[in-house]
Image (cartoon, helix red, strand yellow):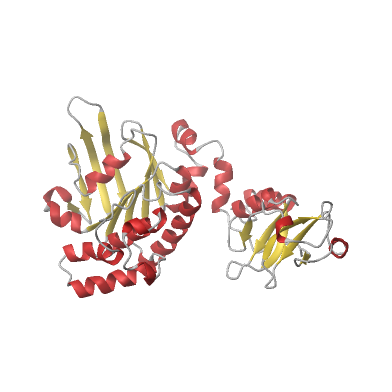
């Protein structure tokens, strides 16, 4: 457990960066610090491994005050992931990963074996092992940075905006990969982000800081959305927090999926009209995986991939109401496509009306939102 006990950081002649911060980051959980610029997020994070020394108060790791620890030994106990990964440019990927284990006295051969194993755990193949950082994409570098932080098997990890330097698509992939990894390893993690959606997606608990480094509220994402402590927290989370709350509402077993007719590429419009519910027909591949929607009113020849509307997203059956609502809103037909999470095969569709009724049932305590 990481504990902040009335921690303050005051710089000479400047405003207070962090004021009286008290909170607990539980073992095996991910705590996210979020807030506006100048709220002391990164300062608070760096005080844990004493890259910045607190002016007053105490930070404890499993009950032991960090000010009593040797600084070098303290930092070796804590994995640290930063923006842009901070890899050593002259070392290969496996050498970069092995470096933290080597600093902790692990033999070179064992450290390199661990590095190769961690490559797989962070979603990279062995083909990357002997590449250099400049040969990797930004997302791949961040994966290596996470693997390097894990190489010494630290109990605690600090992550300073680890995914902010990559594009939105890669960022979402990295977040999903990290959630999978955290479920496996169960580290005690404190992470800093400026992105409230990222905080709500990744955090077991979220600490919202005010400008000036004061704690406004610390709570689970679900509680934060449902019961913001005050107007500042409510405003920071955003006006669409009701929509964000749907991310924590699972699809109930009674979700009313309808059977959606599908056709294959190459089907003639006349044949497709015989099974279609309206002008829109769903096109699937040979394995039953949806490809996109075809507009039969605009179709003059056999259905081709280039003719399809690809705007609709897919909702996994084990997903949330936010997934399925987005699928319905983004589909030109207005019907959200629900697929099997394992193989991507079509399970059925659901309309906006049914989704609204599912949300309403949850609000009344009888459906997936409750």
Instruction: Choose top left, top right, bottom left or bottom right for residue 52.
Output: top left
Residue 264 quadrant: bottom right
Q: Position of residue 334 (x, y in %)?
A: 74, 50
319 or 256, nearer to the observer: 319
Res 369 seen here: no
Q: Which residue is depicted at the point 44% across and 43% down?
A: 195
Quadrant showing the N terminus: bottom left
Which residue corresponds to the image point at 75% horizontal and 66% vertical from the top-left? 265
Pick whichever, 122 or 16, lies toward us.
Answer: 122
The answer to whether one can see residue 318 in this image is yes
Q: Is residue 297 above or below residue 184?
A: above
Q: Is residue 148 above or below residue 44?
A: below
- Measured as percent of width and height from the top left, residue 175 is found at 45, 55
Q: Quadrant of residue 51?
A: top left
In this view, 346 is above or below 170: below
Q: Who is closer to the viewer here, 129 or 190?
A: 129
Measuring from the top left, give residue 295's x and y in whole percent. Answer: 79, 53
Residue drawn where x is 27% and y is 56% of the image: 89
Residues 201 and 171: in front is 171
Q: How many marks?
A: 0
Q: Residue at x 22, y 26 (%)?
A: 14
């Amino acid at each position: 457990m990481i504990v902040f006990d009335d921690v303050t950081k005051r710089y000479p002649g400047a405003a207070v960066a962090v004021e009286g911060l008290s909170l607990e980051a539980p073992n095996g959980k991910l705590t996210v610090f979020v807030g506006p610029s100048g709220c002391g997020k990164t300062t608070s994070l760096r005080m844990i491994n004493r890259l910045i020394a607190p002016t007053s108060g105490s930070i404890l790791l499993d009950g032991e005050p960090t000010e009593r620890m040797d600084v070098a030994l303290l930092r070796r106990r804590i994995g640290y992931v930063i923006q842009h990964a901070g890899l050593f440019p002259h070392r290969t990927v496996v050498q970069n990963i092995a470096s933290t284990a080597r600093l902790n006295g692990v033999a070179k051969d064992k450290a390199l074996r661990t590095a190769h194993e961690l490559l797989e755990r962070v979603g990279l193949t062995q083909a990357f092992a002997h590449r250099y950082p400049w040969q990797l994409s930004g997302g791949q570098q961040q994966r290596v940075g996470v693997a390097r932080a894990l190489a010494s098997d630290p109990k605690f990890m600090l992550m300073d905006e680890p995914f902010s330097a990559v594009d939105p698509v890669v960022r979402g992939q990295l977040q999903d990969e990290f959630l999978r990894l955290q479920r496996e390893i169960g580290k005690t993690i404190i992470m800093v982000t400026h992105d409230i959606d990222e905080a709500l997606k990744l955090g077991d608990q979220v600490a919202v800081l005010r400008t000036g480094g004061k704690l406004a509220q610390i709570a689970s994402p679900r509680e934060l959305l449902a019961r913001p402590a005050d107007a500042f927290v409510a405003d920071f989370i955003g006006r669409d927090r009701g929509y964000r709350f749907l991310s924590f509402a699972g699809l109930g077993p009674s979700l009313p999926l309808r059977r959606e007719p599908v056709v294959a590429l190459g089907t003639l419009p006349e044949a497709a009209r015989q099974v279609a519910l309206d002008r829109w027909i769903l096109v699937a591949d040979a394995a039953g995986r949806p490809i996109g929607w075809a507009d039969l009113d605009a179709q003059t020849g056999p259905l081709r991939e280039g003719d399809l509307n690809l705007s609709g997203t897919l909702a996994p059956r084990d997903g949330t109401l936010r997934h399925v609502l987005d699928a319905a809103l983004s589909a030109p037909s207005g019907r959200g496509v629900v697929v099997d999470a394992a193989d991507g095969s079509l399970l059925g569709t659901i309309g906006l009306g049914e989704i609204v009724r599912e949300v309403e049932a949850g609000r009344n305590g009888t459906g997936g939102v409750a």
